[in-house]
Amino acid sequence: MRTMTAAGARKVRSRTWTTLADVMSRWAFMGPAAIILGAMLAYPIFYTVEISFSRFDLMTFSAVEWIGWENYAHVLDDYRFWSSMKVTLVYLVFALPLQIVLGFGIAFLINADWRGRGTVRALFIIPMVVAPVVAGGIWRMILDPLWGIMNWLIGLAGFAPLDWFGDPNLAMAAIVIIDTWRWTPFVVLIATAALLSLPRDIFEAAEIDGANWWSMLWSITLPLLVPIIAATFVVRWLGAVKMFDIALAATYGGPGGATNVINLFIYEEAFRSLRFAESAAMAVIVLVLTMVLTGIFLFGTRKLEERC
Amino acid sequence: MSRIHEAAGSVSRRALMAAAVSTVAMAAFGGTAARAQDGLGTPEQPIEVRMIANEAFANQWQTLMVPEFNKAYPNIKVTIDGVPYVELLAKSMLDATGPSPTYDIIIADDPWVPQLAEVGALMDLKSAEAAAWTDAGYDWDDFNAAPLAAGEWKGVQYGVPLRSNMLMMFVNKALYEKAGVPVPTPDITWEQYLAQAPKLVQDTNGDGKVDAWAIDTYFVREPLTPTIWQTIMNSNGGSLLDENGKPAFNTEIGIAALETHKKLLEFAPTGAVSHGFSESLQAFRQGLVATMFNWGSVYKGSAIDEKTTTLKPDQVGIQALPAGSGGPGAHRGIWNGTVSSKSENKQAAWTVIQWLSSKEGEAWHSANLGVFPARKSTLAAKPSVEWLGPVFVGLQQAYDAAEKGKMWRIRHPRSDAAQQILADEHSRFMAGQIGAAEALQVAADKIEKVLD
């Protein structure tokens, strides 16, 4: 009995030690990543949240006094915040679907086996590696009403020159065009990879059954691509919602506030007006909204994947 | 013998006394001199001074100005970090409020001195400490009042003008002559200017298309654009704030000035509503516009330097902006040299700034880099290069106008926030989204809250 107890105790000790060693080894792997994430990601976010509820003292450059929701009240009372949110929404509504449709459309077209396809794919990467400020500056020159090549081409076609950055609607169109020029290649790359990974046997079976090009696209390709399209949409959504550098370089947020997207407004309030507390409050609002919408999109993506 | 002894004793005592006196003197003055020398470095132990400045001119200063300064002060090593304008204030504030700032010298734009001074970041340049390091020949009274006032806040002098910029009117005389319009004189009024403007929108090569316009300047949504409106308003007797620091621009004069600024668009190149500093400069230097309201410092690159302009020196005129009921217009844009209050090299830092703002430094700066001086004596003297002659005349006129009409941006610890509000509302008006009265009303309400 005593021997049994000792063996049992040894067994329990051994099991405990094994569990402990297992936990420790897991944390040994996770620890560095957790610490880096905590320092580089979580701390700035929590600090931003702290500033958003505080009075920011420029003398010490830190949050000094807890003032509750006061900064949020100021922000929500500022028509410029709501105007920037509206501008951001308009930009997202036009830019995102355009990039997804164009990206998958181009991928579908260049997916056929033709000479020089590799070169074209490589060229597609160029806009992605151009710095956004440079892209904005180049497009500002292209679209310049006086010197730009775009209006020259429009003139050759017999149309009157367009004031791309002077008209609020055209300025928004310019931002959507520049952003689409930059990011459609990214969608093309993902879509091309997705198209290449589609199972060939289904298409061969459909061909034997007499399905035409359109039937195969509509009934096979698109349904199979839906999860990829949804995932690409979420990735682009997260990128697009952060956009401000193109607007800063191309239109300065104008004319009026026509292209003053929310992140440009936050940047200006923080670094030009030195209103760090109000800017932090706006950043937190945008963060929460983005998280909620991303959650909804991810939920939708999962549902689409389950259906497929 | 005793006389000899007495004489010897007397000589000895005198020698001892002289030796004692000289020792005391050396201890007193020589020690001070040694300490002063320490503050300015020695060949063995040079002092390193770091400066934060706008990237637009930081590199030019590092490569041209610092070697010139080192001819006079070889033991002070100056390192200049250039920062983009939009980030300069925030970075300067962040550094200056830290426990051990990196920068000994902060080059602050016109409206930033109150913001930096209010957080205790700057040293009083007229304090007893600074006075002990100030050269006896450094003449404070020689500065024009308007540029010197840019470095002052609540009666304390925190900065001195190093790059004295003024918003001025540039004239392409060739386009005036081609249009058969008399070249403007410094007395031209806004009414006369606007009456001439339609004639300056012209087809210069006879192909049936307009290829030259009357004006280009700031119209785009950015903080410097309202300075044009403000100059028009100031020259007509209006002001940004009243004596209590409350917005005073929402008046008939302010509204009329805003409408005048928008009217300029009728005589400006296509798409000028999105033009700012660079675009208007490009248009002027390519000979497309008869006038340009821009910062005077671009004169050299617009009239003299063949690499950057198509115009010849005799084609380009420079003067104050047209006159309103109160006189001609201008707008102050001074880059101030300031010393960090936490610097460990205050003496060396102040020496750098002092040299650059001295009569000698200003003369070198304007002759070699085309930078405008702030001293009356420099402006009154015969410049070392011929092209500076008419520029100095125009500049003195602009200083006088700015001083008379208080033509500068809001001076307050939150001046940049106020300026951004002005830019937002001004741009909405320019884009036709709201009327002039509404734009100024919204701006006044918001600025009152911000400055409160």
Image (tube, grey):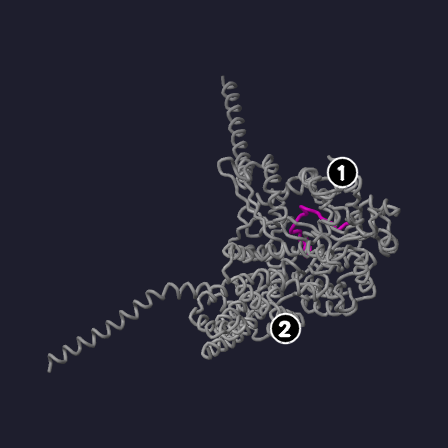
- Per the picture, the main secondary structure of the magenta-coloured stretch is strand
User: Magenta part of the protein: which range?
Assistant: B152-168
The CA span between labels 1 and 2 is 52 Å
Amino acid carrying mark 2 in the image: His
Residue drawn at (73%, 39%) of the image: B304
| Residue B142 appears in the rendering | no
Instruction: Pick out the residue farthest to the bottom.
Output: A1
Assess whether residue B244 is covered by the magenta stretch: no
Residue A48: x and y in percent read: 52, 68
Residue B349: x and y in percent read: 58, 45
Q: Residue A228 or B58: which is nearer the viewer? A: A228
Residue drawn at (72%, 54%) of the image: A152
> What's the chain of the residue with tag 2?
A
Residue drawn at (55%, 34%) of the image: B25
Residue B235: x and y in percent read: 82, 56
Q: Which mark is residue A75?
A: none
Q: Is residue B401 left or right of residue A86?
A: right
Identify the residue under disc 2.
Answer: A74
Amino acid carrying mark 1 in the image: Trp
Q: Residue B279 or B370: which is nearer the viewer? A: B279
Identify the residue under disc 1.
Answer: B387
Q: Residue A247 or A4: which is nearer the viewer? A: A247
